[in-house]
Amino acid sequence: MTPLLDGVLLGLAAGTGLLLVLRHAPPLRPIRLQDRLAPYVSDAPRASRLLTDPVSTGSLDLVRVLLRPVLGDAVRILDRFIGGRTSVRRRLDALGSGLGVEDFRVEQVIWGALGLGSGAVLGILFAGLTASVSPLSLLLFGVGGLTAGVVGRDWWLTQQVSRREATMLAEFPVVAELLALAVTAGEGPVGAIDRVCRLTGGELGRELSATLASARSGLSLVDALQALSDRTSLAVLSRFVDGIVVATERGTPLADVLRAQAADVREAGKRRLLEAGGRKEIAMMVPVVFLVLPVTVLFALYPGLVSIVRLAQ
């Protein structure tokens, strides 16, 4: 490393530290609402620990406790610039991970910090390889790494939701058939869902278990099923749940509705298989066109080309 690069890095570290100290000093530190209200509610009895959130010792909570002021400001800045809380909330609900929007923003900040560090390291390596130090290139590498980390966490959330929905879609025909059989055999809606949850597993089974737990905790079955339909973005599952809700509200024979819904699910599964087969067929043509066919043409033309060259000589 050159002295100029050492000076740039030391100056950047010193400036960052000084900025953090000034930002969180008492004259500039924002006063939180709980600090303002603490003198007036200090004599209030402590709430039961049964009503508080359980203490978690995960790495995310440890990082949040250690870097709470910095992470809080970074989360607010990131939320102000990126936005999209509704989309994030919808995808987190579809994932069923139990994370909140604030927890996801904290993970984005951590990913962005890791990306910033990786970009800085790449910038230093690039400067070492080119034997020239450019603060602009270091800044570009750092900003690129920061952006890649923040956007990468959002992309990874979308991928997780897509994989979970694909798993639920693969499990859905079996679950629909089991529900139809259970209701036809004389089970009620709650009993049929309970039996299916005990017989099956997977992502869809966990979603139905959460719906059943909501129904047993005081929420009506129709509202719990409607919440399941709102959480998922699968059109087939939403139509199935809406059919159960309509049949329950209007008194339609549930067995007939579930059998019709199960038949629709089977037809939708057949259409998905045909569509997947069509896509795979096109994908199979790629090596044939770009690998097998050129090699065949080369084998066919090479002897004639050799003969022409010999005759020309």
Image (tube, rainbow, N blue to C red):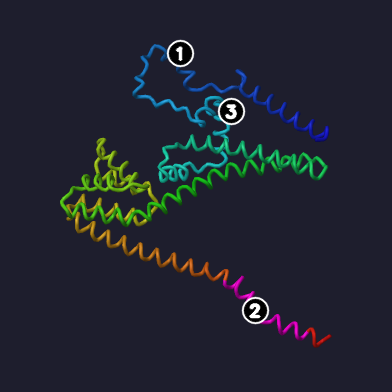
Q: Check disc 3: other Cα within 10 Å, few if <14, some if 14-19, many if 20+.
A: some
* Mark sitting on residue 70: 3
Q: Earlier in the sequence, mark 3 or mark 2?
A: 3
The vertical placement of 10 against 78, above or below, is above
Q: Is 297 colored magenta in this rendering?
A: yes
**Tag 3 secondary structure:** helix
Q: Are marks 3 and 2 in contact (CB under 8 Å)?
A: no
Front one among 64 and 90: 64
The mark closer to the camera, 1 or 3, is 3
Q: What residue type is labelled 1?
A: Pro
Q: Position of residue 258 (x, y in %)?
A: 24, 56
Front one among 222 and 61: 61
Left or right: 174, with 81 as reference point: left
The mark closer to the camera, 3 or 2, is 2
Q: Which amino acid does label 3 sit on?
A: Val
Q: What residue type is labelled 2?
A: Val
Q: Give the range drawn in magenta.
A: 288-308
**Tag 1 secondary structure:** helix
* Mark sitting on residue 39: 1
Whole-number angstrom distance, CA of label 1 to CA of label 3: 25 Å
Q: In which quarter of the image is residue 239?
A: bottom left
Residue located 64% across and 74% down the image? 295
Q: Where is residue 132 in the image (x, y as percent from the top left)?
A: 82, 42
Q: Do the residues labelled 1 and 3 touch (CB within 8 Å)?
A: no
Residue pointed to by mark 2:
297
Residue located 45% across and 51% down the image? 163
Residue located 53% across and 21% down the image? 31
Q: Is 207 colored magenta in this rendering?
A: no
Q: Which of marks 1 and 2 is nearer the N terminus?
A: 1
Whole-number angstrom distance, CA of label 3 to CA of label 2: 64 Å
